[in-house]
Amino acid sequence: MNVSVLNLEYFFAVNPNVSTYFESNNGLWRDYISESGASYRMVDNLIPLHDIVNSINLHQIQMKSTSNYITIMEPKIKNQLITVSIHGNQDFIRNSKSEVLSRYSQVNTKTIQISQREFLAINEKFTSQLFKLCSQYHTEIVINNSKMTQEDGIGALSGYYIHVLGSQDNITITESSLRILIDNILNNYFLDSIDIQLSMIPLIGGIQLFNFNQVAKQSNSNIYIPDLLPSLFNSKIFSNTSNVKLWITAKTIPEILLTKNIIDKISEERFRNDIIVKEIELTKVKIDLMTLYNQSEILNIMFKHGIFIQMPSLGEKNNCKILIQGCSLEAVNEAVLEVNLLSTSYYCVQLNCVANQLNEYNLIQLMQDRKTCVITSNRFGIDINGNSGEIKQLLNDMAATPCIDFNTLKLRLELHNNQRDFISGKKNGKLIKIMNQLNQLPMIKFSPFNEYNFYIDFEIYEGTNMSVLLKGLDLIEMELPSELKFNIPEVFHKSIIGNGGSIIQSIMKKYNVFIKFSSTVSGTTSKNIYSFKRYDNVLIKCPRKNSKNIQLVKNEIDQLVYQCCLNNNPPKSFPNATTTVYHTVKFQLLKSHYLLLINNNKLQIINELENENNTYINFPTSIEEFKGNDVIVEIKGSEARTKHCFKQIEAMLPKNYEFKVTMSVGKFEETFSGVNKQDFYNNVIVPFKILLGVEISVNSTPIARSSSNENTASSTEDYHQIILSYYNEESLKPAIDSLTLYLRQHGFLILDKKALEFNPLVETVKPNVMALRSLSNQAVDNQGNKPAYKKHKSPVKQPKVHYN
């Protein structure tokens, strides 16, 4: 008889026994009584499985089939797994497994803390909407007063919490809808939405959804995106993902309009680019395992590369393909590689053994406490699929206490094609060495699987000690590649590599690693929209047995970059190294200029200028880096190229028009940064942004001066300054007229208004060459003491992501 046994995680969420102010009753609660007699309610994922199993078994009874049936072992206190055993012919097992998995879900809880003001604002309209949410998304909602302990452990804070309970897919979309309700009803925010394709959201949102973050920061709004993996557990919330909604909330309508305007522009830019789609075909059992246990990794790959991944639903029949969509070929290829690497974390064991050993009890014993393992047996033997760690643990148990006599045992690993030469070595030297260590006992075979991956099969025969197989597996795993990718500005590559590669080869030899420097791939920067991003161009790679050295190499390279920035000489340990002197040009970047650059899709030009001039531009990566209305940006490189690069940047900056307003500190602050600032924002700033493409910089004291008047009497700070920055000349006159009218209506006297010949150059720093100290990790001072090791970070800035 054919038998298939699989373990599924048991999930439950208990209604906390605290003061409850609201509780839905949508049919998910189960009432329990503990041994002490206390009653409690909870939501779990066991009942739907019982329902589908009973339905299948009843149908088989009606069909008078006694050989096809399913049994369920419920979870125990020490084993929180649901064990499902399916007996019958191959078609019954395949179809029943699909139906059981399609009814399985992971129950969870999401909690939102609300303020006391929001809690007191809860009214009948809000609770009515909560009931509708529960009914629409099949979840339960509880509002209660929980206790929250402070991190320092001193005292406790009372808080008000809204808990959403239900299946993972459903509570994710319910949580977003609930936050929108809180903004709209409890905080009186305005609400609007944008229709969008689900598959385009990560492409428009960009890497780490950073574009949405920056739009929200600029427009003072909240942006809510739908669940990007809405149907992993067969949720029917979205009947059609080609048209979902991106929700926007804000305190004022102008802020809503500004948010929609910017997102529409980003969407237009994305749709102008070609959309690249690739598909990966894997075995059905691996796709189901990845759906169950690699959801967060799949989402992280989406966010990391700004691409969309479509996974089949759990148990979905006749679909073994994963689709990956993006705007950049490089990003799609990297995502394909990482998804394939996820699949390689699952191993397969095939045993050819005697049929009478294949009873259900033996199979369940093998599965004990192993949540990822799936066992299928028939008259020919047993197939076991599962996570690499659990498969190795299972083989260790079988080697320690043999429970099954096998004729042949085959362990199958799936690896990416780019790992093949690495683990084989030159002329298969690594494999030959491994075989010699194992006395040629296991057979090792390579076979192709798909266009991305291949198989390695270890095979042993009856009478061979299973420890030989485990030793061979350990030796192969130690040869698998570990790697780290990061960015070092290309201007420093030559100095770090050294004359004839002397410096980098010395590091490679010291740590037994491979290091590769590459140039920026053409075509990547053109995809940059709304966020400044440098792509990985340094690769450190080594066998897993040396993986601990990777971070040491990274630290040493970071130190070299730091020394380059200080213009220190190469260490004496590299006598053939050349000295490169880096000049620095500093210039002032206005926040209004930065906003015009990102809103006109000009950030990719910064990447291009870096490459063309072989310089490093310490350009801001987010709006948050502007603490005021300007920042100082540095350009590093050779003297001629830094100056040329600065001239090119200066030429691409917007034009400026300056208003000088009579000094009136109290009135000025009240109008532009005090109680009346929202009026100025709604009636001037937002219309100028949307209708005219003009940015406004309001300064209590001047931050930018005309290059022709730097040394005149007007340079004394005796006036307030308002700067209009623009690209379109036709927008200037209506902007001047509108701002003039607004200032006069609010009682301000305009001293002067004219074009501002803005010179952003701050200074040119002459290099000061110093001797470079030794980079050895074993360096000691003159008293024989090891100095404290201090890490110096690369000057590359990575954007900090904050989700609204």
Image (cartoon, helix red, strand yellow):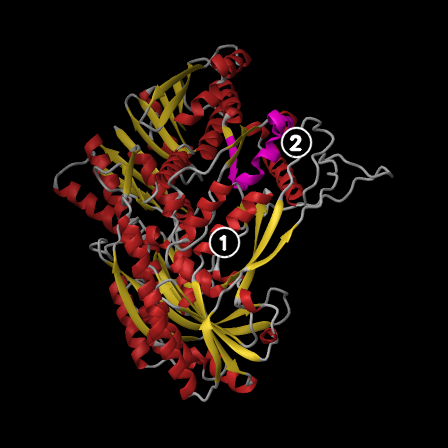
Q: Quadrant of the N terminus?
A: top left
Q: Is residue 478 above or below residue 800?
A: above
Q: Amino acid at mark 2?
A: Thr
Question: Which percent across, then down, holds residue 53?
Answer: 24, 46
Q: Determine the image quadrant of residue 760.
A: bottom right
Residue 446 as seen in the image, left or right of residue 668: left
Residue lying furthest right in this view?
A: 783
Residue located beneath label 1 in the image: 799
Question: Which percent across, then down, holds residue 173?
Answer: 32, 60
Residue 578, disc = 2
Q: What secondary structure predominates along the stretch shown in magenta?
A: helix
Q: Quadrant of the C terminus?
A: bottom left
Between residues 733 and 287, which one lies in front from this camera angle?
A: 733
Report if residue 45 is visible in the image: no
> Magenta span has 494?
yes
Q: Is residue 182 above or below residue 332?
A: below
Q: Amino acid at mark 1?
A: Pro
Question: Which percent across, then down, holds residue 446?
Answer: 38, 18
Q: Provide the secondary structure element on which disc 1 rests.
A: loop
Between residues 228 and 619, which one lies in front from this camera angle?
A: 619
The crowding category of the residue bearing disc 2, from other C-alpha atoms within 10 Å (few below 14, some 14 to 19, many at least 20), is some
The stretch of residues the image draws in magenta is 482-508
Residue 361 as seen in the image, left or right of residue 88: right
Q: Provide the secondary structure element on which disc 2 rests.
A: loop
Report if residue 3 is visible in the image: yes
